[in-house]
Amino acid sequence: MVNKVSSFFNVENKKHSKLILILLSLIFFTGIFSVFTRYPMSWFDEQVHYARVLTYSNNLSASAEGYISESEQEFLSKSMGKIAQSLGQETPEILSLNWKEDYKELSESDRLIKTKDSVAAAIYTPFVYTPYIVAVWLAKLFSLSTISTFLFVRIVGFLTVFTMLIFAIRKIPFGKLSMLIIASIPTVTLSFTAISADTLTYGLIFLYAAQFLYIYQSLSLEKSVSNRDFVFLLIYSIGLVFSKVPSFALVGLYIPLIYIGAKYKILSKKWRVILTSAIFLYALLTVAWLLMIRNLNANVSYYGFKNIDQAKQISFIIQHPLRTIRVFVDSILNYPYFNFQLGYSDFTKGMYVPTLVSLFSILSFFYSFRIQDNNQSIIRKESRIIYNVFSKFVFVGIIVLIFLIFYLQNTEVGSESIAGLQARYFFPFLVLLIPFTNGKNVLDDILSDKIIYLSTIPLIYYLLLMIYQLRN
């Protein structure tokens, strides 16, 4: 078994193979367990994303208020009623083995009606919901019930991103355990299991990072890279452009790739031209999409918030630049990045990983940079420094972009704080911090084992929390 794992993931160190298998197994078990035990719509905004999936399944060009069946609308409304109840009192009922009992009286009417529940997700393309939409089509083909369809959609989404993660781990030339630690952060694992625009986006970020690092390392070592590898990079890139903003910013990593390729004459002129053109094409596509959705203010039309207007907010920024900078600096520096939120409920002990516990994931992630496989190659110093510095600039830029997006879309004009942010938006971009190393200060197998085992504490904590709540 271990030999097969080592061969599949291109790992020579058998102990590292065991660690990979342990982390993948833990993620998979937690994911499947969550799919079946978490109450419908208990993940953040799952109701709006599921409603959007349903409207797209009926019409891929559906407007903000699309059509779903009466039974699907009843299912959404009943689920959100339960969530609203849980927010009003401390209850562990968001996790249950028997939650389906609440839907015994659910009708199975196929008559289509217009829904407003999809409005808040109208800014997302059908592409980002592809696995879910296909799952709904299959569910309709096999005449599955409303509840069975929902569970089937969740399972397909989870298995899709989990498969993408496996192939990303296989492709990435180093940092395999670091990437798995990111995926094992409870908030990330639960995002895999929920119906959300995050799910496919996470998978694409992992695949893109793995493919890019493979190409960058190969070129830096003056090894040939096949056209097929470059084509996959372009495919993953356009996937990021049509997924959740601001994932498109990862395409900025093309710049150091083109630079070292041209400087050391290890990247053909054809691919330098193609990659450079792709940057501009993807930028145009991103701008075009942002312009198309600029007037879709879901926080006003769906959540009923007031005084949220992107045009007025931009005007305010221009008129008060120093004040805006202060708000951004305060928000970015004071944000609780280690707050591992796990869903809706006032039963905070059941939907929250304590900060002290969550730190095990973060600290283990950074220590894991010193875990190296026996066959890990060391690239030239200049190429190493160029990527490590540039990727961190991209990471910081993405963090600022996330705050800017929520300042424009979720925050009242002139507010002293930025509203709507959740830590889950930042976690997938941690892949940008996985560095090329100089091969020094490498951890031995014993310390490597300890780091990985410590990294599992937050997810195991959540698993035990789930079991405890289900038991009671």
Image: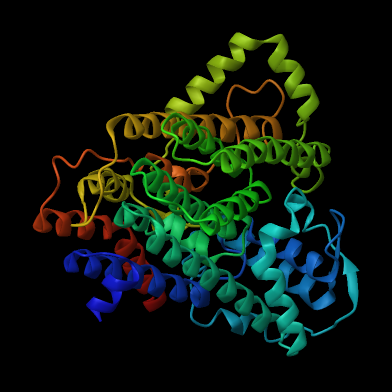
User: Of all residues shown, which one is farthest toward the bottom?
Assistant: 142
Q: Nearer the viewer, residue 215 or 471?
A: 215
Which one is nearer the viewer's eye here, 230 or 65?
230
Tally of numbered tags: 0
Residue 169 locus on image (x, y percent)? 38, 61
Q: Is residue 339 visible?
A: no
Q: Nearer the viewer, residue 446 or 389?
A: 389
Quadrant of the drawing holding the C terminus: bottom left
- Across and down, in percent, residue 38 comes to 52, 70
Q: Quadrant of residue 132?
A: bottom right
Q: Picture quarter containing residue 452?
A: bottom left
The residue at the point 37 percent across, 49 percent down is 223
Color scheme of the displayed model: rainbow
Q: Is residue 223 above or below residue 161?
A: above
Decide if residue 14 is on the left or right side of residue 330: left
- x and y, in percent, of residue 425 in the image: 53, 45
